[in-house]
Structure formats: C-alpha cells, structure tokens
Image: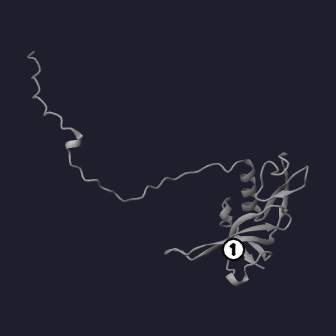
Amino acid sequence: MPPDPVPAPLAAPVPIAALTIEPRAVEGRIRIPYRWPAGRTAGAFLARLRDEGRLYGLRCPRCKQVAVPPRPRCLACRVPSEDWVAVGPEGELLSWTTAPAAPARPAEVWALVRLDGADTALFHRLLDVPPDRLRVGLRVRADVASPTVRRGAITDLIGFCAV
C-alpha cells in the first residue's frame, strides 16, 4: 500500500492584531422559559386561591400575628406557623406607587394592601381607582379571577378595586 500523500504546507498564521474586524451587533431576543417551585407555604396559599377564590394567611401560635402573604415562620417570633386563617376580601390601602405608561400598556398603580384580619400587607395592583381617590386608609376589595380561568398563580388575584 502506498504511503499517504504529504499534505501541502499551511499558510503562516496571521497575528490577531493584524486582522481588521468590524464589530457587529446582532439584535434579537432569546426566550428562556423557566419554572420554579413556589414552595410548601406559597403553594398552599396559591392552591387555596385557585380552589376557593379566597385569600389566606398564617397565624403565629405565639404572637398571633397573621402574615399575608403567608410565611412558614413568623417574621416577629421566628416560630413555625401552621394555622391557616381566611382574610379579606376587603382591606385598606397603606401605600402605592404608579408605574408609568409604556407604548403597549397604560399606567398602573401598585399598592400595599392590609387585608381585614391580617397584620402584614400584600403588594398587588389597584384596578380602576382614579388618582384623586388614592389615600392611605382607602377601603379596597380583592377582585379574584373566575373559577374557570384560575390556575394557581398570584395572577388569580386580578387586583384590588375601591369599595
């Protein structure tokens, strides 16, 4: 069998500094779908919202404070909390901020709402509340999606409307 032919010699390498390369930007979007577990406590909160259309908090066995959104441990005592308590659906406005309008969406008002029966506040959207009606203490009511469209996400709570 004849020997393999000897390959032709390669061109001498060119130093990178000698190359003239124009930088280019490629515009585009990368979609990265992701999912993460809500955890035992938040998962139970969202399942109750989906199944019952109600909001719940967890009561601390020591200081009796009710946390909404629920937390597995009391924020004040650090004691495990397992006593589920129905709260709301009404509450009071504690604070708010406005997200300015963008080309594809109108301005939104986001608020901290302390639901009746809760000691902490839930951050969510205010719906159809004119700016001149916004004030600390404004009574609001939770607007929950209809049972046919609820899926166990915080978006099952559409937002809060003025009472």
Q: Residue 147 at what x, y percent from top left? A: 70, 67
Q: Where is residue 137 in the image (x, y as percent from the top left)?
A: 80, 75
In depth, the one of 39 and 114 nearer the eye is: 114
Q: Quadrant of residue 10?
A: top left
* Res. 143 in view: no
Q: What element carries label 1?
A: strand
Determine which quarter of the picture holds residue 163. bottom right
The image's colouring method is: one colour
Query: Residue at horizontal 75%, vertical 56%?
Result: 45
Residue that carries the numbered disc 1 in the rendered image:
126
Q: In this view, does 40 lie above or below 128?
A: above
Instruction: Check the picture and name the quadrant holding the N terminus.
Output: top left
Q: In which quarter of the image is residue 84?
A: bottom right
Q: Could you tell me which residue is drawn at 20 percent across and 45 percent down?
A: 19
Q: Is residue 38 left or right of residue 138?
A: left
Left or right of residue 53, residue 3 in this image: left
Residue found 28% across the figure and 53% down from its top:
23
Which amino acid type is marked by label 1? Leu
The crowd level at tag 1 (other Cα within 10 Å; few <14, some 14-19, many 20+) is many
Determine if residue 40 is in view: yes
Residue 140 vs residue 36, the one in the foreground = 140
> Is 67 left, or right, of 103 in this rendering?
right
- What is the residue that sits farthest to the front in this orientation? 17
Q: Is residue 87 above or below residue 84?
A: below
Position of residue 155 measured from the top left corner of the image (x, y, whole percent)? 65, 64
Depth order, front residue of 5/151: 5
